[in-house]
Image: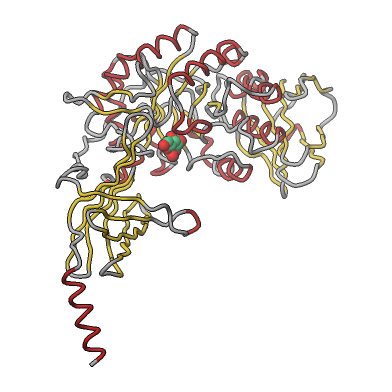
């Protein structure tokens, strides 16, 4: 009898439980005048909930629900290239509000968020636009050597604004960075505002006047870069260029933009990795049609063998991996993926192992010297990622070592390859214009270690000059080999000429 009553009670509770069906929005207003909106479009059928969840760059489908009648756990996933991404949302109805939590860091529940009912259709995911046939986009003739400059993301993330960019441009123009070759001042994600009724993109409150900002940066003898995504949203959930490629390229050209980083992000919800080339071709065509010289930076985390087709879409650089962070292991993990890509770098188009972390505080100066040396021997773009308005002399010295930068910018444009590896010690060699070679003796181990380079192994027969690029000294060019004690996590970098 007791069981019967309990069942009856549960049945009645289920019947009376309010229905979660409908469109729900969690609106998170930002201090830039935009709002990060998360949409849960739910359909309840008894104790089962289906539907979709749209959050920043992700559009999930709900596959399964458990719990009820009060609290439900929604299991959702999406296909991201060849991998499935999963998430789970816990939802509880309380009157007119839906209380939502997602697993936070380490699996602990994240903060309680409140969703309200939204009109049907609001936040609906746009339909897929079919892609054009592949063709070659004319090369833009830019980036004959790897681009050099600064990018806001690593240090500022969403905190970048007009004042910060002006301050960085002022610093760059006056502190020796510009003199050393750094020229692009690149605004990453979070500058985007809304589109107007004609579909024209506007910057948000943090950037009151992009044209004026570009004029200011240009007045310093520098160039201005911007960021977008081929998807409906950028990675941070801001407005992307989806369906507005030509319009956005024209707007950027009219503002005076000189560099565009184009980040896959939410395009993952509409296109497969195999379709990436066509997606990036659209913006390549749009930039070409816009008629302004604009460096085209492809950011899609090294997927779909981008190095094989990047030049076809007029890409000047392409990311080879996921995001760097300011840790030795992150820098090393990225570095270890570069050797196999050496043959794809050439004047006009470069492998991009991501922006520099030098000066952000998570590595030692020795490690930052290694970071600078390795990126330079790889012919990587050198985009400083620290606060250039406020950096100690030791960091300034690393970023502006002109002898190391000259290796990065060598006009032959050849990326280094690993010459040898023995335990934690590696020797890298890069061909330079005029038959010279750059060498990095790299000690990734925990102790200072003596390393030896046999000149014959590096392919240099009659050496007339050896230069130590960090000591800024010539080394006597006698004998058949060079030896040095290389510090833990450090390098010795040389230039050998015949
Ligand atoms: C991605 C990119 C980063 C940065 C962020 C901005 O993660 O790989 O370099 O642009 O997006 O949201």
Position of 416 relative to 209 (above/below): below
Q: Quarter-wise, where is residue 8 in the image? A: bottom left
Q: Ligand 1 is in which quadrant of the figure?
A: top left
- The answer to which image quadrant residue 87 occupies is bottom left
The number of callouts visible is: 0
The quadrant of the rendering that contains the C terminus is top right
Can the viewer see residue 272 in this picture? no
In this rendering, is residue 17 above or below 9?
above
Colour pattern of the rendering: secondary structure
Name the residue located 48 percent from the left edge and 39 percent from the top edge: 320
Asked if residue 45 shows in the view, the reply is yes
Residue lying at the far bottom of the rendered structure: 1
Q: Could you tell whether 497 is left or right of 203 in the image?
A: right
Q: Nearer the viewer, residue 181 or 137?
A: 181
Report x, y in % for residue 376.
61, 28
Q: Is residue 257 left or right of residue 201?
A: right
Q: Residue at x 37, y 31 (%)?
A: 262
Q: Taking 267 as reference, is 77 above or below it?
A: below
Residue drawn at x 52%, y 18% is: 168
Residue 493 position by quadrant: top right
Q: Residue 70: horizontal and vertical position, in percent?
A: 28, 67
């Amino acid at each position: 009898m007791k069981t019967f009553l309990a069942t009856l009670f549960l049945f009645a509770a289920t019947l009376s439980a309010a229905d979660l069906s409908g469109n729900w929005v969690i609106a998170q207003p930002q201090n830039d005048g935009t709002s990060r909106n998360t949409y849960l479009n739910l359909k309840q059928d008894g104790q089962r909930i289906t539907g979709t969840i749209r959050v920043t760059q992700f559009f999930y489908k709900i596959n399964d629900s458990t719990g009820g009648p009060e609290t439900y756990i929604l299991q959702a996933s999406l296909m991201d290239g060849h991998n499935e991404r999963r998430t789970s949302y816990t939802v509880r109805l309380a009157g007119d509000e839906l209380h939502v939590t997602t697993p936070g860091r380490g699996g602990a529940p994240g903060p309680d968020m409140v969703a309200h009912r939204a009109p049907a259709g609001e936040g609906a995911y746009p339909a897929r636009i079919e892609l054009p046939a592949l063709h070659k986009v004319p090369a833009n003739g830019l980036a004959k050597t790897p681009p050099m400059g600064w990018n806001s993301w690593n240090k500022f993330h969403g905190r970048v604004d007009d004042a910060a960019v002006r301050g960085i441009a002022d610093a760059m123009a006056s502190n020796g960075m510009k003199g050393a070759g750094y020229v692009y001042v690149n605004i990453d994600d979070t500058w985007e505002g809304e589109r107007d009724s004609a579909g024209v993109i506007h910057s948000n409150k943090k950037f009151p006047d992009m044209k004026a900002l570009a004029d200011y940066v240009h007045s310093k003898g520098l160039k201005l870069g911007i960021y977008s995504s081929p998807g409906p949203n950028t990675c941070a959930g801001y407005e992307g260029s989806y369906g507005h490629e030509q319009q956005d390229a024209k707007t950027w050209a009219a503002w005076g933009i000189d560099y565009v980083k184009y980040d896959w992000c939410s395009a993952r919800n509409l296109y497969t990795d195999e379709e990436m080339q066509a997606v990036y071709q659209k913006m390549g065509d749009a930039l070409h049609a816009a008629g302004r010289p604009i460096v085209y930076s492809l950011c899609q985390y090294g997927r779909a063998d981008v190095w094989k087709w990047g030049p076809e879409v007029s890409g000047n650089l392409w990311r080879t991996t996921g995001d760097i962070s300011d840790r030795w292991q992150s820098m090393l993990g990225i570095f270890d993926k570069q050797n196999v890509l050496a043959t794809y770098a050439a004047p006009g188009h470069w492998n991009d192992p991501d922006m520099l972390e030098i000066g952000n505080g998570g590595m030692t100066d020795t490690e930052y010297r290694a970071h600078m040396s390795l990126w330079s021997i790889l012919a990587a773009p050198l985009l400083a990622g620290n606060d250039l308005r406020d950096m100690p002399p030791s960091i300034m010295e690393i970023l502006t070592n002109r002898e190391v930068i000259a290796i990065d910018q060598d006009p032959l444009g050849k990326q280094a390859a690993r010459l040898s590896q023995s335990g934690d010690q590696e020797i890298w060699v890069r061909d330079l214009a005029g038959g010279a070679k750059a060498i990095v003796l790299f000690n990734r181990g925990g102790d200072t270690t003596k390393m030896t380079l046999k000149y014959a192994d590096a392919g240099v027969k009659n050496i007339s000059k050896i230069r130590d690029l960090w000591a800024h000294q010539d080394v006597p060019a006698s004998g058949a080999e060079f030896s040095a004690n290389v510090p833990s996590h450090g390098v010795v970098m040389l230039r050998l000429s015949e």
